[in-house]
Image (cartoon, rainbow, N blue to C red):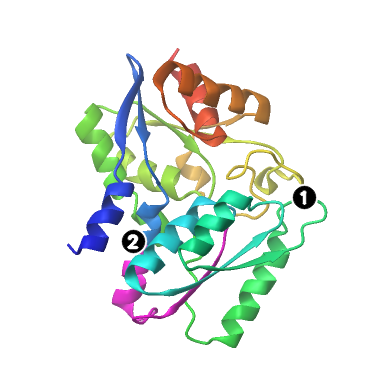
Amino acid sequence: MSTADTFLATYETPRPARLAPNLLAACFPLMKLIPARFMIARARASGYLSSGGHIVETTSGTFGLALAMIAAAQGYRLTLISADTLIDRTLRCRLELLGARLEVVDDPDGSGAQSRRLERLQAVREKDAGTFWPAQYDNPDNCYAYGRLAEWFVRQVGQVDCLVGCAGSGGSLCGTAAILREVFPELVVIAVDTPPVCSSGHPPGQRLLRGLGNSILPRNLDHRLIDEIHWVGALPAFAAAHQLCRDHALFMGPTSGAAALVARFAGS
């Protein structure tokens, strides 16, 4: 393993946090590195991405950061497309310092401008025919990457009775659940989400919880694997994130807070 790969592997390795006697959390420096590294490696192996090639993706946060870290370490060109309501100054500076080219589209209604972002992405791909698009919402490699996380849970816990995770792109929740259910057929899988979300018939709209409440239908979000969906608003999610900090010294975002809140409820 190269020095760059060792460095990146450290960022994608979880550490266990015992939130309750029957509740274990997997805490990551940057979880999105798991699918990002796996997808890039598979693209290189299959010939879809050449050495020093061009990667393009739409992002609202940490998947883009993961791609930027990989691109900087492995010498790829990277274009990230986002909306002005999604990228704050701190994240933008981090992405640009890592060498990513950031294109930001207008988002007047605050819904995330997903259609505008995809239109711009297609324009970039048409201009550069050799561009690789990871397509995290639909690429099955996103799910396959989380086989390692399923193995980690088995090593840490042994018998896994219930898995709680954010719906998001479907990669982490469904990828982990698919493997765990092969081992534990009675596993209960709980998805955490926030409205509005188009899979439940909601039109695109403003959301305070980024990473939840999809305005598109991810192919990787396999509802056949999910037993329950729990809806969490912004206020309880932020409050739960503050509680993680106070009680466990875990500095996590509100989507992690939402998952922890539901997991505590499920384990009570």
Residue drawn at x 26%, y 62% as measured from the top left: 4
Q: Name the image quarter holding residue 126.
A: bottom right
Percent x, y of residue 225: 45, 42
Q: Is 131 situated above or below 88?
A: below
Residue drawn at x 39%, y 79% as measured from the top left: 48
Q: Could you say whether the residue bearing mark 2 is in a helix, strand or loop?
A: helix
Residue drawn at x 65%, y 80% as measured from the top left: 123
Which comes sooner in the sequence, label 1 or label 2?
2
Outermost residue toward the left in this view:
1
The residue identified by callout 2 is 38
Circle number at residue 253: none
* Side of 1 where 125 appears, left or right: right
Magenta span includes 55: yes
Mark closer to the observer (1, 2): 1
Q: Is 30 situated above or below 164?
A: below
Q: Could you say whether the residue bearing mark 1 is in a helix, strand or loop?
A: loop
Q: Name the image quarter holding residue 151.
A: top left
Percent x, y of residue 259: 50, 30
> Disc 1 vs disc 2: Cβ atoms closer than 8 Å?
no
- Amino acid type at circle 2 is Phe
The residue identified by callout 1 is 110
Q: Which residues are magenta?
A: 38-59
* Side of 48 where 183 appears, left or right: left
Q: Is 212 situated above or below 111?
A: above
